[in-house]
Image (cartoon, helix red, strand yellow):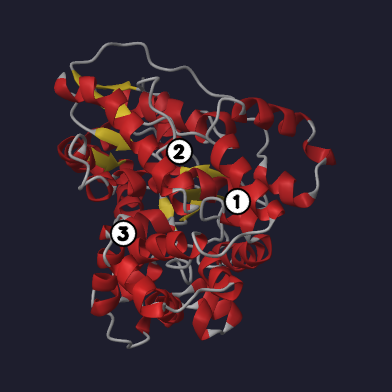
Amino acid sequence: MQTQLAGSIRDTPEGQEAAAIVGRCVHCGFCTATCPTYQLLGDELDGPRGRLYLIKQVLEGVEPTAKTQLHLDRCLTCRACETTCPSGVQYGRLLDIGRKLVGDRVPRSGGARLLRAVLQGGVTGALFPVAVRLGQALRPLLPRLLRDQVPPRQRSGAWPQRRQLRKVLMLAGCVQPAMKPNINAATARVLDALGIETVVPKAAGCCGAIRFHLADQDGGLSDARRNIDAWWPEVEAGAEAIVMNASGCGSMVKEYGHLLRNDAAYAEKAARVSEMTRDLAELLPEFAPTLKERWISAPRERVVFHPPCSLQHGQRIRGAVEALLTGLGVEVLPFADSHLCCGSAGTYSLLQPDLSRQLRERKLDALMKARPDVILSANIGCVAHLGAAAQIPVRHWIELLDERLAAGR
């Protein structure tokens, strides 16, 4: 039975990819040094190497258990292990496959299924903005777990109305417009100041990461196809890039080409979309001289920049934001363990609240030792998660640029 099961798994494209990834591991254990959950729990099975062994066992026909599922669930998918691994093991891809394989064989409790269904459908649905506004009105009365997920209401500045010769596309995101609407507006204003028009196709929605990383891979790929369909007319019309101001979404969209490589109808378009996708941290440094010319000095402000895992490990973009801000005269302070996750990790803060809070406490302790006036980041999840417990403002870095350019417009 085990041999038959192993054969059936390995014969699938996912099984073949997982086996190839597992085969690259040399079992050196370097990854354990940068794994947040291993550092907290000290259990080999709560580190990348241990989880890799568990997935390898499933591929070989060992029946997974609820304990197997728990260890995989505890992973943040921060991918810090990938930037540490000397063998180039694509652990994030392996974990998604492993969670799907285990999820198909280990039933969850009714409560767990309900919570995941709410996250998959509710967060990405049309009712989410209504729920956020209701939560903001009732925020003082909410239990701590929910209160942490509901940021105070934020006003959004005006969206630029000028037509520009240069155009880029932007994904509004599923949670950002409701939770922190000024991030998208600030992005559009900064790009407008640089002579670039931001187009947000209404038919585009969630990048697909929420469903995909919760083992609903079919749903996540459906989200990807919908976005490609929404963007494609603008791509053909000459849009220069697809700009991301949420690094988690950017990391996912850059994977579209790989995820849809076997889809005859979408493979070519998905590859093109992934090639065109650029994080703000990749785009704006090209305009550093123009930004510096239009930069309006303000009272010196000490900032720390928390680089989201999806930026530094998922997209492998390191130091770009800090270098740009420093070049513009902002005092960017170093802090310890900047490579470690803050505990947000998409839906992780709701599914693993205890571990998430411990990681947030450690991150805020490291950040505050630098004695900053403000904490900056590049992903809505990190901004909201840290902002729920920080004693100083937590903002997206594009908002700082927007404010400093505003007086010169």
Q: Which residue carries the number 3 mark?
A: 318
Mark toward the start of the polypeptide (2 vs 1):
1
Looking at the image, is 25 positioned above or below residue 144? below
Direction from residue 389 to residue 60 in the image, left or right: left
Instruction: For marks 1 and 3, give the CA distance.
Output: 21 Å
Query: Label 3 crowding class (10 Å Cα cut-off): few <14, some 14-19, many 20+?
Result: some
Instruction: For marks 2 and 1, give the CA distance.
Output: 19 Å
Direction from residue 157 to residue 79 in the image, left or right: left
Which residue type carries mark 1? His
Q: Circle 3 sits in a helix, a strand or a loop, which is it?
A: loop
User: Residue 371 at what x, y percent from top left?
Assistant: 58, 61
Direction from residue 155 to residue 277 in the image, left or right: left
User: Residue 235 at what x, y percent from top left?
Assistant: 19, 25
Check if mark 2's residue and mark 1's residue have beta carbons within 8 Å: no
Name the residue furthest right: 141
- Quadrant for the N terminus, please: bottom left
Mark toward the start of the polypeptide (2 vs 3):
3
Using the rendered view, name the quadrant where residue 16 is placed: bottom left
Mark toward the start of the polypeptide (1 vs 3):
3
Q: Which residue carries the number 2 mark?
A: 400
Dot in front, 2 or 1? 1
Q: Which residue carries the number 1 mark?
A: 385
Dot in front, 1 or 3? 1
Which residue type carries mark 3? Arg
Q: Circle 1 sits in a helix, a strand or a loop, which is it?
A: helix
| Residue 131 visible in the shown view | yes
